[in-house]
């Protein structure tokens, strides 16, 4: 009997997982891809309408793992007319360039099509079902049953030997949940309908920048002045248009910095060193790991280590000091200075040692997370994690230029709100009211733009897996000393199987980001999709190989579904 594999969702995580599986050349099997949207391959972060063409990805071309072909090669063979449609010129094609999100959507769309055609040629039976929502999943000894609802039909059942849940980010289809109050800045087509007024945006990272850019291009345009500098030209009747980003620390993200790719190996804070810590399980596991972090940082940039007195700092002291100088400066003054430094380093091919060391260590330190008790998980989340996120979540230089242009045009400010503030979105007026230091500030429109947060099992979209006990939350440590433990996602192992005695091995994989972010706090983005895909693709290939009968497999009638 031919084995069957189903993917729920058809964005980058599915694409990279399927690519890894097909590279294993496992022989014929039945492949079904379910996608709620009208077409496959683009995914929420990259599809048009959901994103404005002005929104940029924050991953350079060279960092995007190739599929059937590298991104630059794909761009090089596009016509000039197609490049204009993709909102770039041929001169902009470069390994280090940052491209519009919708451009990456087209790349993934075409790569998936090419991949599926290759699968059919190799004997895989391919069935792609678009406009088709999976509403539930049920585990049994003989496989997974999916309850599927086509757009123009009633719910039906489909059984598979292996299922990969890759449902991606979880955002509401209609972001305006109350008058003037938006739970997310997507789809951009809804944000762009907001009239010129005073707008509050919670957050100042790339998600908030996406919101600001979408609003800006709907009420004006970015242009170059006579000296080649980017400026913002407001449209007519937009005097009342103004955006305020609310940030706990009052900071903008820093500009993308130059570093060698692929990563140079670490010398001290390595996978092996972390594995040794995990094997010995010292009581102060997190502090031991921070000790390795300090040694690596000092070896990479001794001048920086001396400047900050790294040797004598605790984790909390280092992490507070990391942001202190920026917090003491005007965020836009700092952004302009940091941008100039980053541009100079790019031109010179110069790497800042301490920045590069922190960047390379975040995935190594992440290996600790499942073994931390709740007290140390809180410490990690409050102090250590923000340093890593700030370091790897830098943004394209163009994004910083746009924020500076908006500020100089009087259309954007950043407000530090700290930890002790409250947003009231249930007031009589539209939007929301900020309560801060005894003051009340009303924003007629308010947008939540802090990015995807980790979600608990109760929000998992497939109820039967919760009821069967297969999907459940990571249990809080008894010694946590708090009635409100931190969100640590659902229980999965290192191969992304839900851990449960009630489900056969390799039957189900969960790659749905909001529910595994507690265990893998840095797992967002294309490179994470690729890394997860390699793990699960190899697991699927091994499972299919084990299950293949020893006798000759008869010829299979292959088919290629119409893929839209």
Image (cartoon, rainbow, N blue to C red):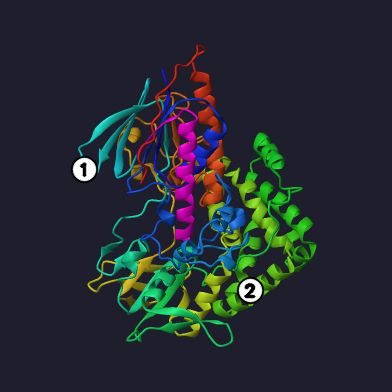
- Residue at image mark 2: 338
Given residues 73 and 241, the one toward you in this image is 73
Specify whether 397 is left or right of 38. right
Q: Horizontal and vertical percent for residue 553?
A: 47, 16
Determine which of the numbered discs, if any, sits on residue 198 in the image: none
Q: Quadrant of the N terminus?
A: top left
User: Up-down: is 294 above or below 461?
Assistant: below
Is 78 in front, or is 151?
A: 78
Name the spot of residue 346 as percent of width and height, x first: 69, 68
Q: Is residue 188 magenta?
A: no
**Disc 2, SS:** helix
> Magenta segment, which residues?
101-128
Q: Residues within 10 Å of mark 2 (few under 14, many from 20)?
A: some
State the residue in front, 149 or 171. Answer: 149
Q: Which mark, residue 152?
A: 1
Residue 413 image offset from top left, x and y in percent: 46, 79
The local secondary structure at tag 1 comes to: loop
- Report the residue at 42% width, 51% height from top: 42
Residue at image point 38% right, 42% down: 457
- Residue 537 vs 50, above or below: the answer is above
Asked if one can make out residue 420 in the rendered structure from this viewpoint, the answer is: yes
Residue at x 24% of width, y 68% of height: 179
Rendered view: 491 above or below 380:
above
109 magenta-colored: yes
Query: Badge 1, how many Cα within 10 Å: few under 14, some, many 20+?
Result: few
Q: Nearer the viewer, mark 2 or mark 1?
A: 1
């Amino acid at each position: 009997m031919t084995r069957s594999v189903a993917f729920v969702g058809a964005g980058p995580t599915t694409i990279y997982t399927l690519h890894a599986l097909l590279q294993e050349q496992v022989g014929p099997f039945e492949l079904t891809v379910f996608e709620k949207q009208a077409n496959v391959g683009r995914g929420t972060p990259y599809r048009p309408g959901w994103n404005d063409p002005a929104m940029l990805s924050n991953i350079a071309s060279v960092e995007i793992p190739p599929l059937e072909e590298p991104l630059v090669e794909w761009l090089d063979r596009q016509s000039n007319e197609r490049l204009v449609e993709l909102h770039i010129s041929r001169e902009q094609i470069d390994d280090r360039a940052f491209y519009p999100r919708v451009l990456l959507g087209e790349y993934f769309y075409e790569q998936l099509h090419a991949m599926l055609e290759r699968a059919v040629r190799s004997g895989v039976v391919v069935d792609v079902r678009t406009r088709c929502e999976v509403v539930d999943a049920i585990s049994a000894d003989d496989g997974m049953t999916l309850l599927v609802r086509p757009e123009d039909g009633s719910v039906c059942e489909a059984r598979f030997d292996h299922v990969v849940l890759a449902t991606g980010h979880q955002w509401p289809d209609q972001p305006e949940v109350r008058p003037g109050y938006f739970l997310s800045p997507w789809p951009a087509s809804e944000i762009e309908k907001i009239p010129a007024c005073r707008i509050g945006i919670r957050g100042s990272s790339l998600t908030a920048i996406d919101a600001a850019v979408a609003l800006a291009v709907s009420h004006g345009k970015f242009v170059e002045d006579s000296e080649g500098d980017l400026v913002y030209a407001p449209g007519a009747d937009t005097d009342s248009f103004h955006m305020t980003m609310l940030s706990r620390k009052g900071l903008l993200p820093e500009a993308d910095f130059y570093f060698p790719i692929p990563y140079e190996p670490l010398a001290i804070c390595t996978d092996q060193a972390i594995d040794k810590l995990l094997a010995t399980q010292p009581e102060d596991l997190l502090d031991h790991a921070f000790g390795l972090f300090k040694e690596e940082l000092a070896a990479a940039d001794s001048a920086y280590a001396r400047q900050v007195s790294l040797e004598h700092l605790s984790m909390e002291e280092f992490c507070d000091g990391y942001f202190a100088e920026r917090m003491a400066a005007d965020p836009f003054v700092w952004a302009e200075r940091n941008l100039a430094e980053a541009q100079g380093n790019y031109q010179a091919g110069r790497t800042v040692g301490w920045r590069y060391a922190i960047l390379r260590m975040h995935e190594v330190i992440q290996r600790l997370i499942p073994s931390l008790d709740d007290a140390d998980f809180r410490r990690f989340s409050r102090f250590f994690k923000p340093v890593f996120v700030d370091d790897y979540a830098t943004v394209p230089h163009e994004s910083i230029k746009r924020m500076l242009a908006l500020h100089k045009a009087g259309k954007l400010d950043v407000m530090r709100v700290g930890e002790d503030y409250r947003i009231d979105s249930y007031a009589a007026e539209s939007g929301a009211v900020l309560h801060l230091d005894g003051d009340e500030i009303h924003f007629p429109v308010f947008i939540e733009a802090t990015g995807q947060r980790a979600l608990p099992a109760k929000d998992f979209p497939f109820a039967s897996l919760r009821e069967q006990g297969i999907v459940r939350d990571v249990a809080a440590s008894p010694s946590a000393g708090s009635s409100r433990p931190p969100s640590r996602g659902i229980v999965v192992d290192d191969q992304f199987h839900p851990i449960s005695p009630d489900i056969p091995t390799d039957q189900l994989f969960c790659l749905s980001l909001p529910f595994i972010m507690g265990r893998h706090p840095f797992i967002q983005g294309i490179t994470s999709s690729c890394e997860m895909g390699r793990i699960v693709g190899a697991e699927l290939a091994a499972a299919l190989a084990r299950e293949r009968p020893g006798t000759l497999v008869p010829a299979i009638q292959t088919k290629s579904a119409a893929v839209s």
